[in-house]
Amino acid sequence: MPPRSQTRRPRKPLRHNPDALREAREAARLTQAQLAATVGISPGFYSELESGQRGASEDTLARIATALRLPVTLLEPPKPQRCPWCRYPYAPRADGRIPLHVVRPRGRWCPRGGTPVVVPQAAVA
Ligand SMILES: [Zn+2]
């Protein structure tokens, strides 16, 4: 099933990751209405946050993170990373691996691609 957040997007980049929001709420075993009530926003607005149609203010996102007992960074969009060997940009993955990629201009597989990496916390923050 494709992520729902890929459908309609607002013009501004979102402060939150809609998929992370949904996963965190489901992990906390809360319905959208329950979480919205805890945070003090309307269920309709919360639903739009989770579908990526609306953006959350910094304050609202912080209150959602508090309600879910999570650091707010876990609800934010993944920050792009770069391969330490060739500077290839990639989206962080849950398993912390660098995806396979080709080093330009030589057109060879990068030796760091496909290997596990530990992302230093300083690079994420
Ligand atoms: Zn590389």
Image (cartoon, helix red, strand yellow):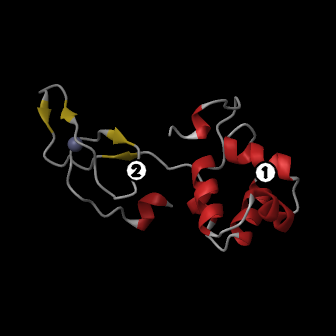
> Which amino acid is tagged 2?
Pro
Which corner quadrant of the figure contains ligand 1? Answer: top left
Q: Residue placed at 76% from the left, 57% from the top?
A: 32
Q: Residue placed at 66% from the left, 42% from the top?
A: 14
Q: Earlier in the sequence, mark 1 or mark 2?
A: 1
Check disc 1: other Cα within 10 Å, few if <14, some if 14-19, many if 20+.
many
> Which amino acid is tagged 1?
Tyr
Closest to the observer: 44 or 1? 1
Closest to the observer: 56 or 53? 53
Name the side, left or right, on which 97 lies relative to 121.
left
In the drawing, what numbered circle is on residue 69?
none
Residue 67: name its quadrant.
bottom right
Closest to the observer: 85 or 35? 35
Q: Secondary structure at mark 1?
A: helix
In the drawing, what numbered circle is on residue 46?
1
> Percent position (x, y) of residue 60?
79, 57
> Percent position (x, y) of residue 5?
61, 39
Q: Is residue 56 visible in the rendered structure shown here?
A: no
Residue identifier under label 2: 92
Closest to the observer: 30 or 63? 30
Q: Is mark 1 within 8 Å of ligand 1?
A: no
Q: Residue placed at 43% from the left, 66% from the top?
A: 121
Name the outermost residue toward the bottom: 69
